[in-house]
Image (tube, rainbow, N blue to C red):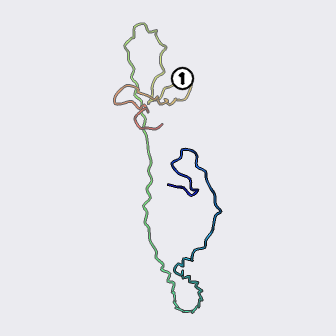
Amino acid sequence: MMNHCHKPVHCHKPANVCHKPTTTQVMPAVVHPTQHNIVEKTCEYIVPEVHPTHTTNVTNHVYKHVHSFPNTISNEQTISNQQFMSNVPVAGAMSQPPRPPMMGGQMMNPGFAPQAQMPMWGNQGGYGHGHGHSGCGCKR
């Protein structure tokens, strides 16, 4: 087998490469189908069309009578005190000076007008429950 330089191919030596000048040849043209382009132009025409309407505004007057029944609430609290005197002597207690007499729930002070007793808060003992204000829902 021979290469283009007429030397045998079966040689183990590097082949000598021959370069010939490049020739250019023009082939006949390949004609493709025609591409069709469309350019559009738009002309607008305005045709006025009138559709008349009429609107009537109606105002309705409605009187709504709202009845209310106000109610007032008042809260009252009563406070009472019960005091008991014991004539039983307590061991180790010193004797106390005599107490002023009681008169209509008021203590009498000699030389002064009767004094109203101040209410005592908390459980005072006696009958029923005390009038302490912790946990009972009362307000002072």
| Residue 49 in the figure: left or right of residue 62 | right
Residue 105 placement, left or right of 18: left
Work out whether 86 lies above or below 115: above
The kind of residue on which mark 1 rests is Pro
Label 1 secondary element? loop
Q: Residues within 10 Å of mark 1 (few under 14, many from 20)?
A: few
Name the image quarter holding residue 18. Answer: bottom right
Q: Is residue 63 above or below residue 44?
A: above
Residue placed under numbered mark 1 in the picture: 110
* Total residue callouts: 1
The residue nearer to you, when weighing 67 against 81, is 67
Question: Residue at 64% of width from left, 64% of height from top?
Answer: 22
Q: Identify the residue at image location x=53%, y=24%.
A: 109
State the residue in front, 24 or 122: 24
Q: Nearer the viewer, residue 139 or 94?
A: 139
Location of residue 72 in the rendering, given as x and y in whole percent from the top left corner: 45, 53
Residue 118 location, x and y as percent?
A: 49, 30
- Residue 73 rendering spot, x and y as whole percentages: 44, 50
Determine the residue positioned at 50% across, 31% down.
Answer: 116
Can you give x and y, in whole percent of width and height, for residue 14 in the image?
58, 46
Task: Report the front residue among 106 and 83.
Answer: 83
As drawn, the residue found furthest toward the top would be 92
Q: Is residue 85 left or right of residue 54?
A: left
Q: Residue furthest right?
A: 21
